[in-house]
Image (cartoon, grey):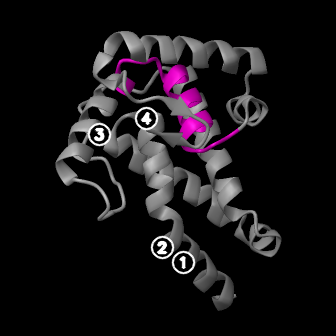
Amino acid sequence: MDVLVDDFDAFVRGRSAALLRSAYLLTGDQHLAEDLVQSALARTHRAWSRLHATGNAEAYTRKVMYHLQVSWWRRGRVAEAFPGDVPEPRTGDRDPHDRSDLRLTLRAALLKLSNKQRAVLVLRYFEDRTEAEAAELLGVTVGTVKSQTAKALARLRTVAPDLADLYFRKGSVR
């Protein structure tokens, strides 16, 4: 049993930062992101004995996060709040001032989107999910994912013209 506990502990330590980044992009708020990750990890822990053997723990945890976030939206209890700092890994290949400006501009723009639009962009461009995968994770149709993506990108172009030289493409934001 201690092996399972140690393995879960290693999983949490190794993947929490990545899960927190995704949760922050989904929620737009540091504290809500932490709550989302904690809730998802609690559910993952309950299922750990079967997940550990399959190697699907991270996929399961992310799916739980997306489902929890959708259920929170449907309840309408997520209040808009001032977000904290964006948790990002440090990289030495870019000017920190450029990254900060970009991060602040992108954060402000994402907060102007609806929750569904933000979730679709996170899944499609940050998580590199297909339209079908995003639809399944959010519990909506592929058509909804397509329309919400189009609306979100159009809204970003309107609310954040500073991002015009950037473009979203599968797997990256440039």
Q: Amino acid at mark 1?
A: Asp
Q: Which residue is mark 3?
A: 103
Q: Amino acid at mark 3?
A: Arg
Which residues are the magenta region? 110-129
Q: Which mark is residue 13?
A: 2
10 Å crowding of disc 2: few (<14), some (14-19), many (20+): few
Q: Residue at x 43, y 12 (%)?
A: 155
1 and 2 marks in contact (CB < 8 Å):
yes
Q: Which mark is residue 19?
A: none
Among numbered discs 4 and 1, the one appearing first in the sequence = 1
Q: Residue at x 21, y 53 (%)?
A: 96
Q: In terms of image quadrants, where is residue 93?
A: bottom left
Give the foreground label among 4 and 1. Answer: 4
Marks 1 and 3, how far apart in space? 30 Å
Q: Residue at x 40, y 30 (%)?
A: 166
- Position of residue 118 measured from the top left corner of the image (x, y, whole percent): 49, 26
Marks 4 and 1, how far apart in space? 25 Å
Q: Which residue is mark 1?
A: 9
Q: Is residue 8 left or right of residue 163?
A: right
Among numbered discs 1 and 3, the one appearing first in the sequence = 1
Q: Which mark is residue 27?
A: 4
Helix, strand or loop at mark 3: helix
Among numbered discs 2 and 4, the one appearing first in the sequence = 2
